[in-house]
Image (tube, rainbow, N blue to C red):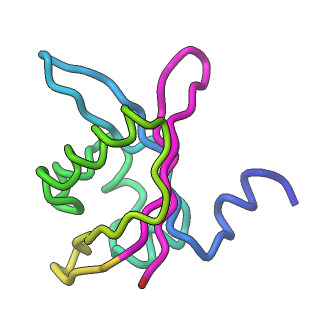
Amino acid sequence: MNLIRAFDDSPTLVSLTRLQAEGGVSMDIYVDVNERFIATLGYSREQLLGHTPTELGIWDPMERAAVLEQIRQLGVLNNAPVTLRAADGSLCPALLNAELVTLDGHQYLLTLLRDI
């Protein structure tokens, strides 16, 4: 099984966001998500890629900012309870595991979410 297939076939919601600062504001933009992420939250890949989790309303901005700050300080976050909002407005409680990774000189956030 190759890495891309493992990413897509995972029963866990997986996303990769690129961290960047724009106008002094730090944000993360979806660059990839797996099929489980799409199916669970009800967004298409096209709706997600190039947008931020808070822009789409998936995350509460205050909760996302707090989570990003914790990850920046620790480099990793494990089993943190979070609540996501699906495209239809329903709430999705989950456990978050996230880690900062560097790819091609850019900083990314690899996020794994497990439905609870």
Q: Is residue 84 above or below residue 106?
A: below
- Residue at the image point whose x is 13% and y is 51% from the top: 61
Could you tell me residue 21's position as x and y percent? 25, 21
Q: Is residue 86 left or right of residue 75?
A: left
Q: Residue at x 43, y 63 (%)?
A: 96
Residues 61 and 75: in front is 75
Q: Is residue 49 magenta?
A: no
- Name the quadrant containing residue 38: bottom left
Q: Examine the image and state in which quarter residue 34 appears.
A: bottom right
Q: Is residue 9 or residue 111 the one in the foreground?
A: 111
State the residue lying farthest toward the right.
Answer: 1
Disc count in the image? Answer: 0
Q: Is residue 102 magenta?
A: yes
Q: Left or right of 80: which side holds 78?
A: right
**Left or right: where does residue 43 sit relative to residue 116?**
left
Q: Quadrant of the C terminus?
A: bottom left
- Where is residue 40 shown, x and y percent of the image? 41, 78
Main secondary-structure element of the magenta-colored stretch: strand
> Where's residue 18, x and y in %?
41, 33
Q: Which residues are magenta?
A: 94-115
Tell me the quarter of the image containing the N terminus: bottom right
User: Compared to 20, does 7 lie above or below?
Assistant: below
- In the image, residue 9 sits, relative to residue 64, either above or below, namely below
